[in-house]
Image (tube, grey):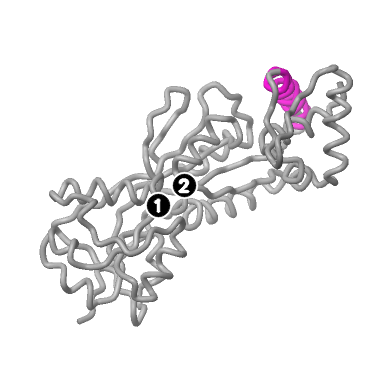
């Protein structure tokens, strides 16, 4: 079997799309289709059922994918080991981050890492916590950094940095909060289900005796930029990571505040698959992230800012 055709097949299998596979492999869609068709002819088996716009792997497709991935992994490992004979740290590293670490913590770490190891190509993908964990579990990401700790026996989780959530909003709303139950009397903008930020909010409210369902929720948003944008438009208040709001300090409109009766603390966790081979580029990045994340944590000093 041709290695290039196997790569095309695996990418279609993973993305469930010929066009997306072509884009990621930097070839034309007809080329991808030709590779898959050629494999199907060679095996005398259909590898995908094409139902409307949906690409569904057949039983044969699932079987071939399992072995094709092993073949490609072995080939990749052989190439890396050959290059490492020259003491080079090279290869591709796919990192997934939930919204806060993906947007506000990982970019600095990755930039510093790449300046030290310029022959490593890093791809950063940002999803909510549940999606990052799922993609690490499926082998579509080498490493993930998430803001919650969902249990998966196949995965290794390790805390790398602490975080705390702070209130953000217009002072006209924030000064109405003088006790825990006052939060139900102001409008809220929150993150979607599956977000580590939302889970930390729910847990913090519960610990203060507040039912999350009592909140006056005006909007649900799938990323932090949109969340802060709606808050800046005076739709309501929110809570989000200290790392996301540090650039807002000094704003003439948005206020960042913490209250002694709420404890919105959490941690960010490194996650990778216990059963997958960890290549040198990933091993070095794991050591790297522990060191650099500590430096980032020490620089965060968000003082209460409240204007009447």
Q: Residue at x 85, y 46 (%)?
A: 28
Q: Residue furthest left?
A: 179
Q: Is residue 180 above or below residue 59?
A: below
Count residues near mark 2 (Cα–Cα under 10 Å), then give few for <14, some for 14-19, many for 20+. Answer: many
Mark 1 highlights which residue?
A: 192
N-terminal of the pair, mark 1 or mark 2, is 2
Tag 2's secondary structure? loop
Q: Is residue 113 above or below residue 246?
A: above
Q: Residue at x 31, y 60 (%)?
A: 239
The overriding secondary structure of the stretch rendered in magenta is helix
From the viewer's side, name the closer residue of 262 and 304. Answer: 262
Q: Residue at x 84, y 27 (%)?
A: 3
Badge number at residue 294: none
Residue 47 percent across, percent down from the top left: 76, 24
Q: In this orientation, does residue 168 appear?
A: yes
Q: Quadrant of residue 240?
A: bottom left
Q: In this orientation, does residue 4 appear?
A: no
Q: State left or right for residue 77 relative to residue 225.
A: right
Q: Nearer the viewer, mark 1 or mark 2?
A: 1
Q: Is residue 82 magenta?
A: yes
Count residues near mark 1 (Cα–Cα under 10 Å), then give few for <14, some for 14-19, many for 20+. Answer: some
Magenta stretch bounds: 60-84
Mark 2 highlights which residue?
A: 128
Quarter of the picture holding the C terminus: bottom left
CB within 8 Å, label 1 to label 2:
yes
Q: Is residue 187 above or below residue 51?
A: below
From the viewer's side, name the closer residue of 65 and 246. Answer: 65
Q: Is residue 301 magenta?
A: no
Residue 244 percent across, percent down from the top left: 41, 61
Q: Quadrant of residue 19?
A: top right
Q: State left or right for residue 176 relative to residue 192.
A: left
Residue 1 percent across, percent down from the top left: 86, 21
């Amino acid at each position: 079997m041709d290695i290039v055709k196997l790569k095309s097949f695996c990418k279609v299998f993973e993305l469930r799309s010929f066009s997306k596979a072509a884009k990621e492999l930097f070839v034309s869609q007809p080329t991808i289709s030709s590779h898959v068709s050629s494999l199907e002819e060679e095996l005398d088996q259909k590898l995908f059922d094409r139902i409307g716009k949906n690409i569904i792997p057949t039983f044969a497709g699932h079987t071939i994918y399992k072995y094709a991935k092993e073949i490609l992994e072995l080939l990749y490992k052989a190439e890396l080991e050959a290059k490492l004979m020259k003491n080079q740290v090279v290869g591709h590293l796919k990192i997934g981050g939930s919204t806060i670490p993906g947007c506000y913590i990982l970019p600095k770490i990755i930039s510093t890492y790449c300046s030290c190891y310029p022959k490593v190509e890093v791809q950063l993908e940002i999803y909510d916590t549940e999606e990052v964990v799922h993609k690490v579990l499926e082998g579509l990401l080498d490493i993930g950094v998430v803001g919650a700790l969902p249990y998966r026996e196949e995965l290794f989780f390790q805390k790398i940095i602490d975080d705390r959530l702070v209130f953000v909003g217009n002072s006209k709303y924030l000064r109405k909060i003088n006790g825990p139950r006052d939060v139900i009397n102001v409008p809220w903008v929150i993150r979607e289900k599956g977000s580590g930020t939302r889970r930390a909010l729910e847990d913090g409210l519960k610990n203060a005796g507040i039912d999350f369902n009592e909140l006056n929720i005006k909007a649900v948003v799938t990323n932090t930029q949109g969340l802060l944008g709606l808050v800046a438009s005076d739709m309501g208040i929110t809570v989000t990571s200290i790392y996301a709001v540090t650039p807002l300090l000094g704003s003439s409109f948005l206020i960042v505040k913490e209250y002694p009766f709420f404890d919105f603390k959490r941690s960010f966790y490194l996650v990778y698959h216990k059963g997958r081979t960890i290549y040198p580029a990933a091993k070095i990045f794991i050591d790297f992230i522990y060191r650099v994340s500590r430096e980032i944590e020490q620089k965060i000093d968000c003082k209460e800012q409240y204007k009447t």
